Image (tube, grey):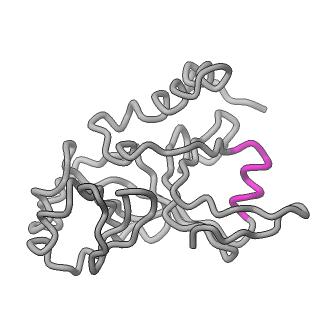
Amino acid sequence: MQGEGQAIGGRAMESMTGKLLVATPALKDPNFDRTVVLLVAHEPGGALGVVLNRATEVPVADVLRDWGDLARHPAVLFEGGPVQPESAICLARMHSPVRRLKGFHQVSGAVGTLDLSVDPDRLRESVQTIRVFAGYAGWGSGQLEQEIEEGSWFVLDALPGDAFVERPDDLWPMVLRRQGGMMAAVAHFPPDVTLN
């Protein structure tokens, strides 16, 4: 996945796996208003990510009992996106250095997806924390690139802790502010103003 390029507008597009998609104020889709999405896969055939800042009130332990104690506060399920909300995607942050583990697929650095069918007791020493997402965000071939060109998304570097922040509601302005300059000013854009 990583390192694969694809052509868009006559130029090669590098894989954005591991990048953050930060919704711009111009994005009209209510599913993604003020969201921060971590891309866990980006290939010529499309892209897949999870929304990092939409916590539910359902404890992870209520749904996945054996995994509950590995989830960091808030230890609840997150709305990962509008596609297949009945499915679960688990992100994990591993202790450094990242060792090859059955059921772990590296996204970036110590962060990756974790197979929830694996026995969590086998992973406890390796896993620092997890976050579980119900559903995901998906794009077909070229769809995400088109949305980026239309100004719907900022593509920004992720920090290892972004997917596991304790105050997910603060993630959208926090990521924008750390960019500095005009990008930081967008963090103060009023939520009830729409752009034409």
Quadrant showing the N terminus:
bottom right
Corner quadrant of residue 134:
bottom left
Which residue lies at the image location 72% right of the left edge and 50% below the top edge? Answer: 148
Placement of 135 over or under 100, stated as above or below = above
Which residue lies at the image location 55% right of the left edge and 52% below the top edge? Answer: 19
Placement of 125 over or under 122, stated as above or below = above
Corner quadrant of residue 174:
top left
In the rendered structure, does residue 165 fall within the stretch colored magenta? no
Q: Would residue 172 appear left or right of 69 to someone viewing this image?
A: right
Tally of marks: 0
Q: Would residue 33 appear left or right of 97 to someone viewing this image?
A: right
Q: Main secondary structure of the magenta part?
A: helix
Q: Which residue extends farthest front?
A: 97
The location of residue 12, given as percent across then percent down, is 80, 64
The location of residue 128, given as percent across then percent down, is 20, 54
Query: As rendered, which of 52 and 43 lies closer to the eye?
Result: 43
Quadrant showing the C terminus:
top right
Placement of 43 over or under 91, stated as above or below = below
Q: Would residue 86 appear left or right of 61 to someone viewing this image?
A: right
Range shown magenta: 143-152
Q: Which residue extends farthest right?
A: 10
Query: As rendered, which of 141 and 189 lies closer to the eye?
Result: 141
The location of residue 150, given as percent across then percent down, is 79, 47
The location of residue 2, given as percent across then percent down, is 57, 68
In the rendered structure, does residue 149 fall within the stretch colored magenta? yes
